């Protein structure tokens, strides 16, 4: 079984809809991250969390919110999706002090 | 602000040959980490190799090695004995010591021909 899972793997939605992307991990890591990948831009950090009570904005947090429901779960929400949020979204986890992030398989989101 | 530049959008190599992917970065810090990630068509991001800036010795992982030039702020990836399974996007990434932000380059697409 995969250590970091993301659901759904693919999603098509319409402008204005609320959508939630979910991430779960069995690695026991305390830190979790959400990234966005756009063609030609690499990965950019949206939000990150050190533990359940600690949430931090990344470089492109506008239009997104997150929830850390448990140490193993970190969800990303788009309250009102817009077409320029069409991208590949990655969740990652890390054990504090180890400086190595482990990525989930990604969610491809298309906003029409 | 720290930046990571990968100037080669695409590279190609013949099977069993060697290829080098380039990466330069800009930082005023002295303690940091550098990474190469591989993204095959499956989309999974896989860590290939990691280098701590304080280490002078270049990191090596099997067929993968780096040429780390701290003064030149250069961090290239060499793939020896290339295999068809090496075909992927490769991303260079930088992380300032003890922070949480990975800064990625824009990637290099590597094609491997039989």
Image (spheres, grey):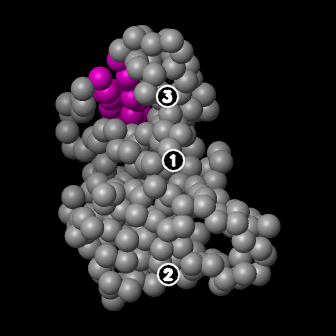
Callout 1 crowding tier (Cα within 10 Å): few <14, some 14–19, many ≥20: some
Q: Judge whether residue A27 is colored magenta.
A: no
Q: Chain of mark 1?
A: B
**Place of residue A63 in the rendered image (x, y in percent of width and height, measured from the top left):** 65, 78
**Place of residue A44 in the rendered image (x, y in percent of width and height, measured from the top left):** 54, 59
Compared with residue A109, is residue B61 higher up or lower down, i.e. above or below? above
Q: Residue B43's mark? A: 1
Callout 3 crowding tier (Cα within 10 Å): few <14, some 14–19, many ≥20: many
Q: Judge whether residue B71 is colored magenta.
A: yes
Secondary structure, magenta segment, majority class: strand
Label 2 close to label 3 by CB (< 8 Å): no
Please report the bounds of the magenta region as a residue range.
B63-80
**Place of residue B74 in the rendered image (x, y in percent of width and height, measured from the top left):** 41, 33
Callout 2 crowding tier (Cα within 10 Å): few <14, some 14–19, many ≥20: many
**Place of residue B23 in the rendered image (x, y in percent of width and height, measured from the top left):** 47, 34
Foreground: disc 2 or disc 1: 1
Residue beneath the point at 54% across and 67% down: A8
Residue beneath the point at 45% across and 22% down: B84
Q: Residue A66's mark? A: 2
Q: Quarter of the image holding residue A62?
A: bottom right
Residue at the spot of label 3: B87
Mark 2 vs mark 1, CA separation in Å = 23 Å
User: Extreme bottom residue here?
Assistant: A53
Q: Residue B31's mark? A: none
Residue beneath the point at 48% across and 74% down: A22
Q: Earlier in the sequence, mark 1 or mark 3?
A: 1
Q: Quarter of the image holding residue A1?
A: bottom left
Mark 1 vs mark 3, CA separation in Å = 12 Å
Does residue A87 appear in this view? Answer: yes
């Amino acid at each position: 079984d995969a250590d970091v899972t993301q659901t759904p793997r693919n999603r098509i939605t319409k402008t204005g809809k609320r959508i939630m992307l979910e991430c779960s991990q069995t690695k026991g890591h305390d830190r979790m991250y959400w990234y966005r990948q756009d063609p030609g831009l690499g990965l950019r950090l949206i939000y990150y969390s050190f533990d359940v009570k600690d949430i931090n904005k990344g470089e492109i947090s506008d239009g997104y919110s997150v929830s850390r429901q448990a140490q193993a779960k970190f969800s990303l929400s788009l309250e009102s999706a817009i077409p320029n949020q069409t991208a590949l979204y990655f969740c990652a986890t890390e054990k504090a002090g180890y400086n190595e992030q482990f990525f989930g398989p990604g969610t491809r989101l298309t906003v029409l | 602000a720290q930046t990571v530049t990968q100037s080669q959008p695409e590279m190609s190599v013949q099977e069993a040959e060697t290829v080098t992917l380039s990466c330069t970065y800009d930082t005023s810090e002295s303690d940091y980490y550098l990474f190469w990630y591989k993204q095959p068509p499956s989309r999974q991001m896989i860590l290939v190799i990691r280098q701590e800036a304080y280490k002078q010795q270049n990191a090596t992982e099997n067929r993968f090695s780096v040429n780390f030039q701290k003064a030149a702020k250069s961090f290239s990836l060499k793939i020896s004995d290339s295999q068809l399974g090496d075909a992927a996007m490769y991303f260079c990434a930088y992380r300032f010591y003890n922070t949480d932000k990975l800064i990625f380059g824009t990637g290099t697409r590597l094609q491997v021909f039989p």
